[in-house]
Image (cartoon, rainbow, N blue to C red):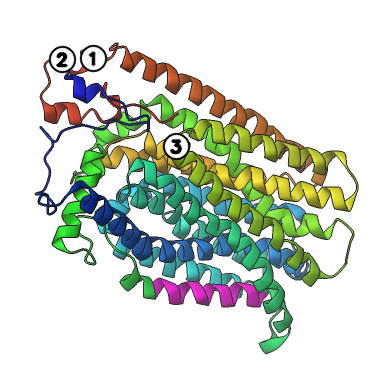
Amino acid sequence: MTEDKEKSSGEGHRVSTHEEGVNLPADPDAHRTDEEKAEIDRKLVRRLDFMLIPWLCLLYLLAFLDRTNIGNAKIAGVQKDLGLTDGQYSASLSIFFVSYAVFEPVTNIMLKKFRPSVFIPIIMVLWGASMLGMGFCYNWSGLMAARWFLGLAEAGLFPGINYYLSCWYKRSEFGLRAAIFFSAAALSGSFGGLLAAAIEKMDGIAGRDGWAWIFILEGLLTIIFGFISFWMVHDFPDEAKFLSEDDRARVIRRLKLDQQASAEHETFQMAYLYQSLRDWKMWLGMVIYMGCDMPLYAFSLFLPAIIKDLGWSTSTVRSQLMSVPPYAVAAVFTVVIGYVADRTRQRGLCNIVVSVIGVAGFAMLLASNSPAVQYAGVFLAALGIYPCISNTVTWMANNVEGVYKRGVVLGFVIGWGNLSGVISSNIYANHKTGHGIVMGFLAVFLFGGSILMTTLLRRENGKRLRGERDHLVEGLDEKQIDKLGDMRPDFYYTT
């Protein structure tokens, strides 16, 4: 292995100092100075941000709004009006996560096969229709069916968009974009509370309850944006129509020089699935993601009820509005952590520190009966959960290479995390019990798992720096070495 190939950038991946052996498109800026190239690259990234991020954030805001608005509907009376027992209400929450998690691992393969500009709009229209149907439910069976299909249709969005963005940006750029994208989930909490408070005032119009109008109007909104998305969602870099030929070459070059196979075409083979299943990072990543995703859904689904039970006000509208500030603060902190993690390349350390904040928040909710202290704990809980979602997804994407392998791994990690939403739907019969279980998930799986992952990755990087993995490429040509993905000796993990 040549010396220049052994140079680590400190960014968790290999950076070649030359282009030999890399199948690159012709450089459209070969005649320019380094300063001119750097300016063109900055403008290109800004254009990608403008064309991709805002619309995708809007789509995820709608998705998270649609999956969690049943919490707002509960305090608006859906459980009472449909005659649901506590067990039936919890089951209607749980069934969403079952279909959502089961289908997530295969959605990234479907996204790659059918193209983002087709796949994403179709699933949006389908989940919008499911949400619309929830507004016309008259019993538990109808609500269960609607929630099942909502989970099935939404399964492709979150893992799909994270995989999609990881195929556009360099590893050192992806964390901030993933954080901005996921901050839409926190914003949906703020927006959802405000929107629910407004829509609930339609109670009685056309003979429908206020909670029904929450489902109907938000479902119609999703369907409308789903149809618009046929024109607003773009395909992968090698097919995106908004790029000129020069810009397409620039995007593909920067991805390949970042050692990303996402710039290449691959045909799906079962070997990619087997590679993913044999990768210990996927299994540990599933544990870590479960440690933040179960608390996320517990927090999102039950926050309106938690605030209502603080005893400050019996007003449903006020309870909806008081759920807004914690989400807004969490959205800002999510972006801040995304920026810090990109700059420091210490994603594991960010998870560890942020999870401690979350544990402190739930400890306040457990230990105090003061409404003021508990409301402050709600803020810390939000700050300790939301940033770790996008940071963990980025961490996994940074450390898995290969077009389909990365897609499969992200599908399994996110799918398993979302399956833990079944737990979150059934732990808040008693608030103290619920807070204790959530705190345990944060402490054991998120905090403990992140420490273990960081330790193991640093140990593996040390072995690669010392040349203890060089035997893996002996006798292989450049193409065969590239197929090793993150197993190649000059690939350094983000810790």
- Local packing at callout 2 (Cα closer than 10 Å; few below 14, some 14-19, many 20+) is few
Callout 3 secondary element:
helix
Question: Is residue 218 part of the magenta span, yes or no?
Answer: yes
**What residue sits right under mark 1 in the picture?**
470
The residue identified by callout 2 is 474
State the residue in front, 74 or 235: 235
**Could you say which is closer to the camera, residue 480 or residue 242?**
242
Q: Amino acid at mark 3?
A: Trp
Please report the residue visible at 68 percent of the width from the left and 67 percent of the height from the top: 193
> In the displayed structure, does residue 36 sit left or right of residue 328?
left
Determine the CA span between mark 3 and mark 1.
Answer: 24 Å
Instruction: Tell me which amino acid carries mark 1.
Output: Asp
Magenta span covers which residues?
212-227
Residue at the (78%, 72%) spot, across then down? 317
- Please name the residue that numbered disc 3 is placed on: 395
Marks 2 and 1 sit apart, C-alpha to C-alpha, by: 7 Å
Residue 153 appears left or right of 424 = left
Please, what secondary structure does the residue beneath circle 2 have? loop
Indicate the quadrant containing the N terminus: top left, top right, bottom left or bottom right: top left
Q: Are marks 2 and 1 in contact (CB under 8 Å)?
A: yes
Is residue 23 inside the magenta stretch?
A: no
Give me the residue at 31% from left, 30% from top: 274
